[in-house]
Image: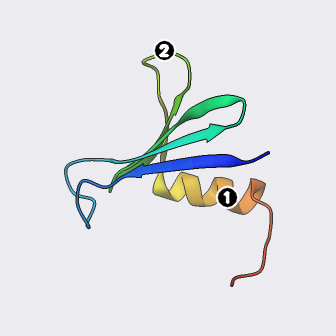
Amino acid sequence: MAHEVNVKFHATVVAHRDIEIEIKTNMGKLGTLLISKGNVEWLPKSKSVNKKRLSWPKFAELMESEGRSTRKK
């Protein structure tokens, strides 16, 4: 399954506006990842206004416990 990732950079340093990363597959949009200096948020593909938010420490914890290990390139 191929993925399409579109990134909108508003600045080189994350300050007052989120970095928006739109994730799509050949089946359609999965959602949008919003990255800010305070947290990371997931906005599902649905028209929902409810985002899922994790602080950076919680995101790191989730990746350590649920992420798949790969070698650094």
Name the outermost residue toward the bottom.
Answer: 73
Which dot marks residue 12?
Answer: none
Q: Is residue 13 above or below residue 36?
A: below
Question: How packed is label 1: few (under 14 Cα within 10 Å), some, or many (20 or more)?
Answer: few
Q: Quadrant of residue 68?
A: bottom right
Picture quarter with the N terminus: top right
User: Does dot 2 land on a helix, a strand or a loop?
Assistant: loop
Q: Is residue 59 above or below residue 34?
A: below
User: Does dot 1 land on a helix, a strand or a loop?
Assistant: helix
Q: Nearer the viewer, residue 16 or 57?
A: 16
Q: Earlier in the sequence, mark 2 or mark 1?
A: 2
Question: How packed is label 2: few (under 14 Cα within 10 Å), some, or many (20 or more)?
Answer: few
Q: Nearer the viewer, residue 52 or 26?
A: 26
Percent across and percent down for residue 22 are: 49, 41
Q: Quadrant of residue 37?
A: bottom left
Lateral position of residue 63 relative to residue 66, left or right: left
User: What's the residue at 75%, 58% (across, down)?
Assistant: 67
Picture quarter with the C terminus: bottom right
Residue type (three-letter) at the residue carrying disc 2: Lys
User: What's the residue at 61%, 38% (across, down)?
Assistant: 24
User: What's the residue at 21%, 57% (across, down)?
Assistant: 15
Q: Is residue 15 above or below residue 53?
A: below
Whether the residues at callouts 2 and 1 have beta carbons within 8 Å, the answer is no
Name the outermost residue toward the top.
Answer: 47
Q: Which residue is mark 2?
A: 47
Q: Which residue is mark 1?
A: 63
Percent across and percent down for residue 6 are: 48, 48
Lateral position of residue 50 relative to residue 59, left or right: left
User: What's the residue at 62%, 33% (across, down)?
Assistant: 30
Q: Calculate the distance from the C-alpha at mark 2 to the C-alpha at mark 1.
A: 27 Å
Residue type (three-letter) at the residue carrying disc 1: Met
